[in-house]
Amino acid sequence: MNNINYNLEMEKIIDKNRKEGLKPKLLMQVCCAPCSTTVMHRIKDDFDIDMYFYNPMIYPKTELEKRSDYVGVLAKRIGIDGKVIVPENDVRDFYDVAKKRKDSAEGSEACYDCYKLRLRETAKYAKEHGYDYFCTTLSISPYKNSKWINEIGRGLEEEYGVKYLYSDFKKRNGYQMSIELSKKYQLYRQSYCGCVFSYNEMKEHNEKMKNDDTGL
Ligand code: SF4
């Protein structure tokens, strides 16, 4: 099933629920506050949303805590009634993915596994706690592969028996909107994806830019 417009798929689901007068319970895996802005704006009136901050790969720990704290800040500023759930984020959960990621670039198969790790935990929690849907904010990023994310969601939907909310939040200018909303809500915006590898790549890039500027 190639070239599916997952944003349209989401809109069909929302239309159907509206017609039936339903406001389903949704567990949303959130990677950070800025990526959650557009997502919450778009769907907060159509679902009862709890946010699930499961991102065990985020390095260093201070960054993990900062991103998680800002999700709470956003929830208050944007007016989300649901909970912000922060389960244990144990970096050891990420070790198998790290073995692949250390020899590959951002956007490689290791990142597929990283999406899956986070979505699997979300689907599992959603199943155990009686949610109607689960989803993730990850598709808002232009660096994230929405086809992979939705395929993973479809597989986990079958495995856990909880509906996945198909979506592609970068559509309809979603990413640009998240930048503007992050400014509006005065949110911290990080400059790397999350794991130690992306952290080191960001550092190297910044160093190179600095040297280029100084002609070194
Ligand atoms: S670059 Fe991002 S998606 Fe890829 S492994 Fe690191 S944290 Fe996960």
Image (cartoon, grey):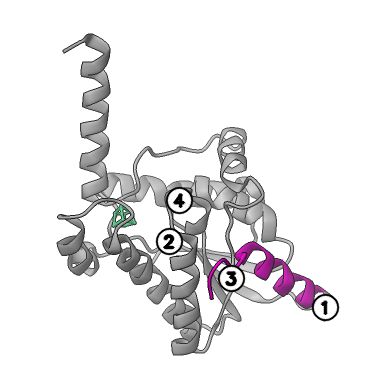
Q: CA distance from mark 1 to mark 3?
A: 20 Å
Residue at image mark 1: 21
The residue that mark 4 highlights is: 32
Ligand 1 lies in quarter: bottom left
- The crowd level at tag 3 (other Cα within 10 Å; few <14, some 14-19, many 20+) is many
Q: Position of residue 5 (x, y in %)?
A: 62, 64
The residue under label 1 is which amino acid type? Gly
Q: Is residue 62 above or below residue 58?
A: above
Q: CA distance from mark 2 to mark 4?
A: 8 Å
Going by the numbered disc 2, the residue's amino acid type is: Phe
Identify the secondary structure beneath mark 1: loop
Read off the magenta span.
1-18
Relative to residue 38, is residue 154 depicted above or below? below
Q: Quadrant of residue 163?
A: bottom right
Magenta portion: prevailing SS class = helix
User: Which amino acid is tagged 4?
Assistant: Cys
Reading the chain from its start, which is encountered first: label 2 or label 4? 4
Q: Earlier in the sequence, mark 1 or mark 3?
A: 1
Alpha-carbon distance for marks 2 and 1?
A: 29 Å
Residue 209: where, in percent of width, then height?
Answer: 27, 22
